[in-house]
Amino acid sequence: MFESNKMVDNNAKDMVRSANLTKINDKEFFMPRMTVDPYYCKGCGLCIPVCPQKIIRLSDQINEKGYHYAECFDQEACIACKMCYIACPDVAITIEK
């Protein structure tokens, strides 16, 4: 049971890696990615004003707890400054470089 979960996790990680991969002058680069775990986000909005790129908003969707959670609506503009990560009191934000 645990091995199959690890296999699924590895496949998911590979898909995320390929989604973040960008080619510039025939060289591949990983683009930064900001993700919010909807389960932990309570929609406080503290991440929104600290984002220098202004690419975070509250989602129209509601999580299990009944909150509108934060989401990044323009991943390509993310500079991975981690300001949203630092501001989040619920540790719901992950930054991948």
Image (tube, helix red, strand yellow):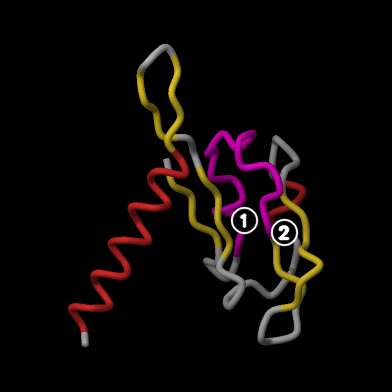
Depth check: give the residue in front, 31 or 89.
31
Residue that badge 2 annotates: 46
The residue under label 2 is which amino acid type? Leu
Q: Residue 15 location, x and y as percent? A: 40, 53
Q: Residue at the spot x=53%, y=45% of the render? A: 82
Residue 72 magenta = yes
Q: Is residue 87 above or below residue 27?
A: below
**Quadrant of the rendered image containing residue 67:** bottom right
Task: Inspect the image, locate mark 1, and give the three-letter code of the amino acid beneath it.
Answer: Ala
Question: Helix, strand or loop at disc 2?
Answer: loop
Magenta region:
71-88
Q: Is residue 51 left or right of residue 30?
A: right
Residue at image position (81%, 67%) is 60
Label 2 environment density (alpha carbons within 10 Å; few <14, some 14–19, many ≥20) = some
Residue that badge 1 annotates: 87
Q: Position of residue 17 (x, y in %)?
A: 38, 46
Query: Residue 16: x and y, percent?
Result: 42, 51
